Amino acid sequence: MLANYHFINRKYCNAIPELEVELFKNPSNNINKKKLIICYTQSDNLQKAIDLFIDLLLQDIDLIIDTDVEYEDCPCPDLIAMLENKTIKRESELNLFIELGILWLYCDRNESVKYFLHARKLEPSNKSLNTILNLLQQS
């Protein structure tokens, strides 16, 4: 699939249309959702990433938590390093914390929760953040 080619080559913006078409054809394909979430975070579509992230957490939270970073060639460790080192810049601290919370869940649940808690301190009434944290606490 062309989407996988783009994803593996870290061409996230190119992978999005392909993954969206595949997801439209097969809405229950959680593997595509998992990849699309990462693509959305890297293409200034954070709200789409959040919405799809919550959807996937509701359906199959373990799919993200149990990611085998090496086997799946997951880009999250590299993306996290660039975000934490400020090689990749984000428009706000809130967006940075949310993105890091999403990406860290592919690698380490505790680090993910830490970033979502930082984000909630900045915006305590954010419904999405509260939903995510509730789902992570229930798992």
Image (spheres, rainbow, N blue to C red):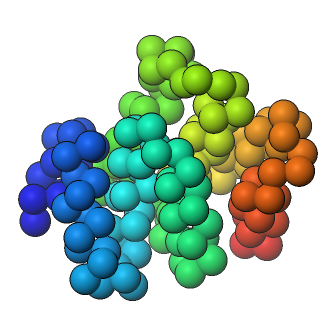
Residue closer to the observer: 90 or 57: 90
In the displayed structure image, the side of residue 9 where residue 46 appears, left or right: right
Point out residue 93 in the picture as x, y percentages from the top left corner.
Answer: 69, 25
Does the image show residue 126? yes
Q: Residue, x 71% and y 33% (percent of image)?
A: 94
Residue closer to the observer: 72 or 87: 87
Relative vertical location of residue 61 with respect to residue 124 in this rendering, above or below: below
Quadrant showing the C terminus? bottom right
Quadrant showing the N terminus? bottom left
> Count of labels shown?
0
In the displayed structure image, the side of residue 133 where residue 15 appears, left or right: left
Q: Residue, x 23% and y 70% (percent of image)?
A: 21
Does the image show residue 77? no
Quarter of the rendering containing residue 71: bottom left
Relative vertical location of residue 94 with respect to residue 58 in this rendering, above or below: above
Q: Residue, x 57% and y 40% (percent of image)?
A: 99
Point out residue 52 in the picture as x, y percentages from the top left corner.
Answer: 51, 64
Residue closer to the observer: 103 or 131: 131
In the displayed structure image, the side of residue 40 where residue 129 appears, left or right: right
Point out residue 33 in the picture as x, y percentages from the top left corner.
Answer: 40, 67
Q: Residue, x 27% and y 43% (percent of image)?
A: 13
Relative vertical location of residue 14 with respect to residue 122 in this rendering, above or below: below
In the displayed structure image, the side of residue 138 where residue 45 appears, left or right: left
